[in-house]
Image: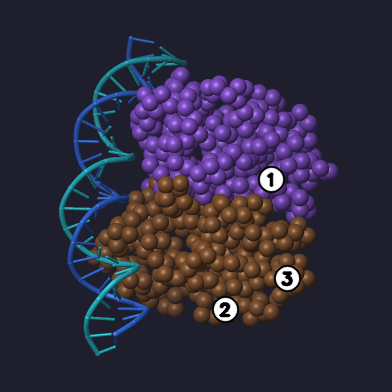
Chain colours: A purple, B brown, C blue, D cyan
DNA sequence: CGCTGCGTTGACGGCTATCAAAGAACGTGG
DNA sequence: CCACGTTCTTTGATAGCCGTCAACGCAGCG
């Protein structure tokens, strides 16, 4: 099993801007706010393998950072061991808890991941000095909050089938935003799901068995095509919309934070 | 049935500070930030009866405000009518969506409520001018996010019994924070639950029947005492903790935002 | 070749939503 | 003060979704 704990070393007090100059994310408002003028917090670029733990639940909250490539998962664990993934962190999004002494959930790599990390206290000082940075952090936090509340709706009200349909649609929308839409109207999009079945089950609050059964039900109805274990052809988007039962505004919430990110192929990691 | 829609009128551009001077909430950081120096946004104090709708899901997000007394509920509705209460807003907390054009959930009065409201755009201008105000809004938003994610855990992982036990404990803790703890160690605290069974069911993602059954199960085990329909004596806090299955850190998240509020009896509304 | 991890498929049982109906509480008007 | 309708709560019976357990197929790998 790959992974284990990762030591996030944030080196020295020196400004480290070289990785940013080639980074596809550098025009995101958050990065812009970080890179305008002299940046008072050191930033380190690190790579983390699948399964590695960036922070444990209850740890001192030492770092704040952004995901450059790959996907992080935020995991909450009950005392008896049951786990819930409360969110994924996609490229361009922030992770870590500003102004909190402890991490309220574990942060783990759901795929191989490239991160940009800073010391939390340094980051907080930077926010205090630069209102435009704090403003960008506020915007991202508001987006996270909207997403978390939509997930309360999904977890609280929807059947397992609806949750899975919602997830497929939400993932499709996010990807289409990233690559800027379909090439032709009739084109069948294929979602490459790098997330494991186990994580998917935890995120959707169900079991891997139910996920497997439901996906095959969808395939039988010709709504999706199962190309292999991690590639799904979305054959009937309208059928999925009907099955998911979500309002358009709730579907869109998940697409917001990813706007303006270049296609992953162009990322320099 | 009381209620119906409420028109939130925010009067003129004049500074309106008189209600604040007698308000028990005036020393909260948010209010301090609002009341230091000249406040560029007009603030109106309004009263809203139970059941009244302050904003509909999908409405233009016109206002931002704080709850002075009573409880607001944030309600999300699926196209087929199923509803989920995604959060309650307690005295001293903020409601409304800064920097969003539309409300992503309905805002309704779960009890009779007193509010302090401002025009959203004026509030945003005030935040832009005053970093300390934006900072307070960020802190409140981060607290809301932590709470929403703990609710993902509760809704996703816990049984109905555990959710109800969690809710009782969380409510107890919130109240104890507000009034500053128990008078004597052996004292049995009584929680006055002003929220209707229907709202409770929606918040905990269950049915009123199951809530009724579960509360009576707890009463049979001598864990709580049912004084009347809205008063619960918490006889065995440790028993509740065991039943709820939450870690201390997740329980505490819900107590944070209420810190430093004076007892409700002292509120001037 | 055996082992391990992952996905799939089948059978079973429990939790809990739903339906239904009766009882309690409340406000209203006579 | 009482009759009455309305709303909320309680209690019982039923059914269904879906989590759990178990077994199997399959791929990767030392």
Badge 1 marks a residue whose secondary structure is strand
On the question of residue B202 being in view, the answer is yes
Left or right: residue A220 versus residue A18 is left
In three-dimensional space, the C-alpha distance between marks 3 and 2, rounded to whole angstroms, equals 22 Å
User: B93 or A45: nearer the eye?
Assistant: B93
In three-dimensional space, the C-alpha distance between marks 3 and 1, rounded to whole angstroms, equals 45 Å
Q: Position of residue A257 (x, y in %)?
A: 63, 41
Q: A85 above or below C30?
A: above
Name the residue beneath numbered marker 1.
A119
Q: Are marks 2 and 1 in contact (CB under 8 Å)?
A: no
Left or right: residue D16 versus residue A94 is left
Name the residue beneath numbered marker 3.
B12
Q: Chain of mark 1?
A: A
User: D12 or A82: nearer the eye?
Assistant: D12
Q: Are both tags, 3 and 1, on one chain?
A: no
Q: Chain of mark 3?
A: B
Name the residue beneath numbered marker 2.
B269
Residue in view at x 44 percent, y 22 percent = A225
Q: Are both tags, 2 and 1, on one chain?
A: no
Q: Residues within 10 Å of mark 1 (few under 14, many from 20)?
A: many
């Amino acid at each position: 099993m790959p992974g284990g704990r990762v030591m996030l070393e944030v080196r020295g007090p020196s400004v480290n801007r070289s990785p940013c100059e080639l980074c596809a994310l550098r025009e995101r408002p958050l990065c812009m706010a970080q890179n305008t003028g002299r940046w008072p917090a050191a930033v380190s670029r690190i790579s983390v393998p699948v399964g590695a733990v960036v922070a444990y639940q209850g740890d001192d909250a030492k770092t704040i950072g952004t995901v450059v490539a790959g996907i992080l998962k935020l995991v909450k664990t009950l005392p008896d061991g049951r786990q819930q993934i409360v969110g994924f962190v996609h490229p361009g999004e922030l992770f870590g808890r500003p102004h909190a002494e402890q991490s309220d959930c574990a942060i783990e790599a759901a795929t191989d991941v490239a991160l940009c990390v800073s010391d939390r206290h340094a980051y907080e000082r930077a926010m205090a000095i630069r209102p435009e940075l704090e403003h960008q952090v506020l915007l991202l936090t508001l987006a996270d909050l909207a997403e978390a509340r939509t997930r309360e709706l999904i977890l609280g009200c929807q059947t397992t089938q609806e949750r899975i349909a919602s997830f497929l649609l939400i993932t499709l929308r996010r990807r289409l935003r990233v690559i800027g839409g379909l090439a032709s109207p009739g084109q069948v999009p294929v979602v490459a799901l790098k997330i494991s079945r186990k994580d998917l089950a935890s995120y959707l609050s169900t079991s891997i068995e139910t996920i497997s059964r439901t996906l095959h039900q969808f395939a039988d109805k010709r709504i999706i095509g199962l190309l292999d274990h991690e590639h799904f052809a979305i054959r009937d988007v309208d059928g999925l919309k009907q099955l998911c039962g979500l309002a358009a505004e709730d579907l869109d919430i998940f697409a917001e934070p990813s706007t303006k990110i270049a296609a992953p192929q162009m990322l320099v990691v």
